[in-house]
Image: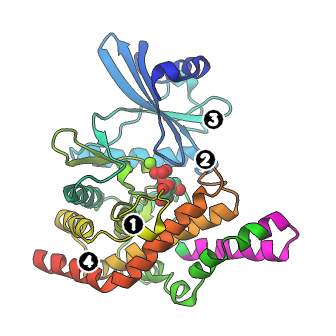
């Protein structure tokens, strides 16, 4: 949305918020709502200051999802400092002016009595919501590999879990099953009908051949079979910035879910989002397939930019399966729970999203062998 179209009131509120941060302000010449994230509310603001035109991203942190904004920002600032020290591009947050700082929220969050706000420098770049060529996938893979490499000497145990059990698929499955069970035995006829209307999707999720595979990565971490690393955990295509001129990935953004984890979460989640022949929002689950050309290009990007252990490499395809399964569970559970987490423009959005993930899951199951072959060819080639 353009500056002129934002309500006068919102524009004034934003102007006022900017005054709370350590920047030199000026006349706002551009203001847009950034609408491609599902969780936080974001605005891009351009101002004409004594130093020329400067742009920032102002964000309202969703504190229903991120319940500890201070810890969240501590995580992000230590990780971004580490990346910046290596001379790599990353997000830079702006401190709140001392007189507006609140000890509970720390130096990077302005609390207006209701909401938590943060401000960061705008990075000149392209954001992609859709892939236009296989080379985009190689760049995406390199961004994930570079991120892992830049943080390979960062002590993951110093980070707090901003969303506990974020990629604990088994816990997510348990939560959905508990919800359905209590609806089934409970008094709410509306919710009971809501569950019966997605009976096929529920059955698909709770089928034993799927549920028995749910711990494949958490078990490997618990047993020490794969290393605990810093992972991004939400590497959707539009959480990576691309260079406008070279098309190469510049850096990863949306660092709220950076936590101790495994690169497998990043690998699997990026593939399930970006190598789907349809979008996450598609109305045509019957057209959903894994795009092998994209998958191959992505694997090349990741494998060429970071080093994986043998066990990690063996679990790459499982991670794609698992992250797709997890998102199918999360979207379906949120639909049953009346869209409280992801939100919806109209009821049914999250069921539609769940159907896309289920269709992708089935396609992955049909083609696991080919996917494993692609991984092992590239991994073997790189030695
Ligand atoms: C959310 O905020 P956004 O749009 O980058 C979600 C991800 C999901 C994604 C699905 C904190 O990401 O986990 O994969 O939607 N982020 C959080 O589109 O829950
Ligand atoms: Mg995002």
| Mark 4: secondary structure | loop
Near mark 1 (Cα within 10 A), the count class, few <14, some 14-19 or many ≥20, is many
Q: Quadrant of residue 335?
A: bottom right
In this view, the mark in front (3 or 1): 1
**Which region of the structure is painted magenta?**
170-192
| Mark 3: secondary structure | loop
Q: Which residue is mark 2?
A: 345
| Mark 2: secondary structure | loop
The answer to whether mark 2 and mark 4 are in CB contact below 8 A is no
Q: Is residue 14 above or below residue 312?
A: above
C-alpha gap between disc 4 and disc 3: 43 Å
Q: Which mark is residue 272?
A: 1
Residue at screen point 19% across, 46% down: 247
Residue at screen point 56% across, 44% down: 69
C-alpha gap between disc 2 and disc 1: 23 Å
Residue at screen point 70% across, 61% down: 337
State which tag comes first along the sequence, 2 or 4. 4
Q: Is residue 351 above or below residue 178?
A: above
Q: Is residue 229 visible?
A: yes
Say whether residue 9 is left or right of residue 308. right
Q: Is residue 25 visible?
A: no
C-alpha gap between disc 3 and disc 1: 33 Å
Q: Which residue is mark 3?
A: 115
């Amino acid at each position: 949305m353009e500056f002129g179209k934002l309500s006068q009131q919102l524009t004034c509120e934003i102007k006022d918020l900017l005054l709370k941060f350590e920047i030199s302000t000026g006349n706002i010449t551009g203001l847009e709502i950034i609408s491609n994230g599902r969780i936080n509310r974001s605005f891009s603001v351009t101002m004409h200051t004594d130093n020329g035109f400067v742009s920032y991203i102002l964000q309202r942190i969703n504190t229903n999802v991120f319940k500890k904004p201070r810890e969240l920002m501590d995580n992000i600032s230590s990780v971004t400092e580490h990346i910046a020290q290596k001379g790599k591009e990353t997000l830079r947050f702006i401190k709140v002016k001392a007189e507006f700082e609140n000890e509970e929220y720390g130096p990077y969050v302005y609390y207006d009595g209701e909401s938590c706000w943060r401000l960061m420098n705008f990075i000149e770049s392209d954001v992609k919501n859709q892939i236009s060529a296989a080379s985009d996938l190689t760049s995406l893979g390199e961004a994930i590999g570079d991120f892992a490499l830049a943080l390979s000497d960062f002590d993951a145990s110093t980070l707090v879990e901003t969303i506990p059990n974020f990629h604990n698929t088994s816990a997510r499955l348990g939560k959905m099953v508990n919800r359905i069970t209590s609806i089934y035995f409970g008094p709410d006829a509306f919710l009971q009908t809501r569950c019966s209307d997605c009976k096929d999707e529920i059955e698909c999720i709770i089928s034993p051949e799927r549920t028995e595979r749910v711990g494949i990565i958490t078990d490997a971490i618990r047993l020490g079979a794969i290393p605990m690393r810093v992972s991004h955990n939400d590497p959707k295509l539009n959480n990576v910035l691309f260079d406008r001129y070279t098309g190469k990935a510049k850096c990863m953004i949306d660092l709220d879910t950076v936590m101790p984890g495994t690169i497998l979460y990043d690998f699997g989640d990026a593939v399930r989002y970006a190598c789907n022949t349809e979008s996450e929002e598609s109305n045509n689950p019957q057209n959903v397939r894994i795009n092998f050309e994209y998958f191959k290009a992505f694997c090349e990007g990741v494998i060429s930019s970071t080093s994986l252990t043998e066990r990690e490499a063996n679990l790459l395809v499982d991670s794609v399966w698992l992250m797709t399964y997890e998102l199918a569970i999360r979207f379906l559970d949120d639909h049953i729970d009346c869209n409280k987490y992801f939100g919806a423009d109209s009821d049914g959005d999250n069921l539609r999203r769940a159907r896309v993930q289920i269709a992708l899951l089935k396609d992955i199951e049909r083609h696991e062998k080919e996917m494993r072959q692609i991984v092992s060819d590239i991994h073997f080639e790189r030695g």
